[in-house]
Image: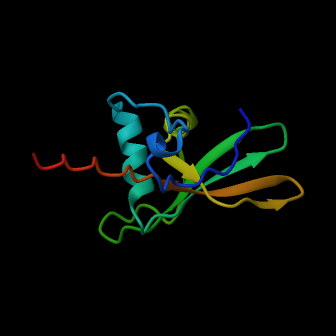
Amino acid sequence: MPLTAVHAQTTDPRANGRRGPRPCGPLSAAEADVLRIVTDARTPVFVTVREGGRRRYSYWRPLDSATGRGGCYAALPTAECDRLYAAGRIALGEPLTDPTRTMYRVTAVRTPAAPAPAPA
């Protein structure tokens, strides 16, 4: 699956005639965990796309002084991240390319609030 940059929607898709992201059902526990990590502003998440299309979603896990764990890169489950991307729940930033890979910043897509009903 080729990945392309997706920008957050700024208008209601019904207003301009274009379809938005496909509707999502309930999230699995793994998808909810991934979305929790992506939405944390203190945790930058990236996807690295290697030649041949192999993808790896990862983030830096800071060192936890209480447990002594962390201080390393941690991979996220690719299947769950790909499902969130296909559902329009996460988006990719501008590409950063070098000869062997392309990296994208992963961000959560904020869904616009439903419009308030018109007063009767």
**How is this picture coloured?**
rainbow
Task: Tell me what residue is drawn at x 12 percent, y 50 percent.
Answer: 119
Direction front: furthest residue: 120
Left or right of 81 on screen, residue 39: left
Apparent side of residue 22 relative to residue 51 in the rendered image (left or right): left
In the rendered image, which quarter is residue 51 located in?
Answer: top right
Residue lying furthest bottom? 65
Q: Is residue 50 left or right of residue 88?
A: right
107 or 115: nearer the viewer: 115
Q: Residue furthest top?
A: 25
Q: How many marks?
A: 0
Q: Nearer the viewer, residue 89 or 23?
A: 23
User: Where does the image place residue 2, in percent across and percent down from the top left?
Assistant: 74, 37
Residue 81 at x, y percent in the picture:
53, 39
Residue found at the very far left of the displayed protein: 120
Quadrant, the N terminus: top right
Q: Position of residue 62 (x, y in %)?
A: 45, 67
- For the C terminus, give its image quadrant: top left
Identify the residue at image location x=45%, y=40%: 14
The one nearer the camera, 60 or 22, is 22
Relative to 78, residue 43 above or below: below
In the image, is residue 15 above or below residue 39? above
Q: Nearer the viewer, residue 14 or 38?
A: 14
Q: Which residue is pictured at 48% across the width and 57% down the height?
A: 10
Q: Residue at x 43, y 45 (%)?
A: 34
Task: Estimate the x, y position of residue 44 in percent, counting from the top left.
Answer: 52, 64
